[in-house]
Every structure is written in structure tokens, then in C-alpha cells.
Amino acid sequence: MVPPLRLFIALPPPTSVLTQLERVGHMLHRQCGGRRVRTDLLHVTLAFLGDTPIERLNELISVFNMLQHASIFALQLDCYGIWRRSGIGWCAPQYIPPPLIELHQRINQGLTGLGLPTETRPFKPHITLLRKALHAPNTEMTDAIIWQVDRFALMASELQADGPHYSSLAEWPLLSAGR
């Protein structure tokens, strides 16, 4: 029997954004302690599917193929903090652009159409930079990171001896506003 895939849908940042997030992660780590998340794991989660039978992969890809008409949008990451209960240190937008809300809703509709569960909590797009953070940051974010989001991806997570590893199973480009 083939084991299930641990899947999620994400916005993978381009290298230029990863470089800026790495700097923010270092600074946040100095202020808050905890354990930094490796740069190659940074992303915004749009939907977490969890353990999914490999037989459902083609269905998922077909549903997401229909979402390609979503538009490119700018995401401004302009605040950071920690969630004390979980110890998660994060970077996020103060304002969620409507195209991101629309993309999130379309993905959830597609998952619901396949009979897959979706998150019931309010959507709070963020990038996890720290785990087990000990203190709240003592400064505010001064330089926003502007990210032109032009794609989303179906990702698989595999736990290995040195921690989690993510691989992209499929990616979908977003369209320019004029198309």
C-alpha cells in the first residue's frame, strides 16, 4: 500500500522575497529567541490538506487547473510578531488584498467540491519565521517587503531525519491583470 501524501497549497516566495524574509527572520530570532525556520521552507499556506491518498492527486491538479484565471497581485508584508500560545514567530500583511482573498476562496471551493475538508478559522495569511519563540518582538517592522505574487503551488511535506522537506508537485501561474 502506498502511504498518503501530506499536502498543502501555498504561495512560494521568489528568491528576492526569501532573501528579505531571511533578514527579518534573523532579526526576529535575536529579539524573540526560539528556532528559525529554514529559508527553503518559507511560504504562505492557502490550504492544508494533510494526509491525502496519492490516488486523489490527479483530481486535485484538475481542480487547480481551473483556477489559473486568478490575477497576479501585490502582497505587502509589513508586520511581524509572535503568537504566544504556539510560540510561532510570523511575518504578515496588515491588509489582505482582495485577489488573495478570492484565490483562497476559490481553492476552498475546489476542495469542498472534491469532498475534502477546509479550514473553518478565519484566513490569516502569514509566513512562519520562528518556532518556539520565547518573547514578543520589541520593535515594529520598518521596511515592508513587497511581493508580486504570480503563482501558487501544490506542495508535499515529508518529515526526514533533519526535519521537514517540501517539494512542489505542481504550480499554477496567475494571470496579469489585463488578461
Image (tube, rainbow, N blue to C red):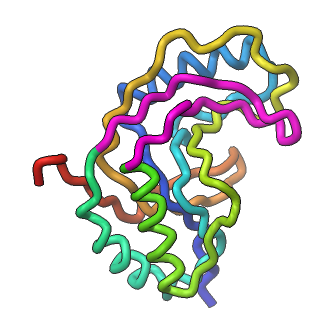
Which percent across, then down, holds residue 106?
A: 42, 67
56 on left or right of 82: left
Q: Quadrant of the N terminus?
A: bottom right
Q: Where is residue 110 drawn, in percent x and y?
A: 44, 76
Residue 84 lies in the magenta stretch:
yes
Left or right: where 128 falls relative to 32: left
Image: magenta residue range = 73-98
Report the residue at 47% width, 64% height from top: 105
Question: In which quadrant of the rendered view does residue 83 lie?
Answer: top right
Question: At 36% across and 25% down in the image, what residue appears?
Answer: 16
Camera-nearest residue between 129 and 177: 177
Q: Is residue 27 left or right of residue 20?
A: right
Residue 82: which quarter of the image? Answer: top right
Residue drawn where x is 56% and y is 66% of the image: 7
User: Taking 165 as reference, is 87 above or below it?
Assistant: above
Quadrant of the snapshot with the C terminus: bottom left
**Front residue (pair 67, 129):** 67
Q: How many marks?
A: 0
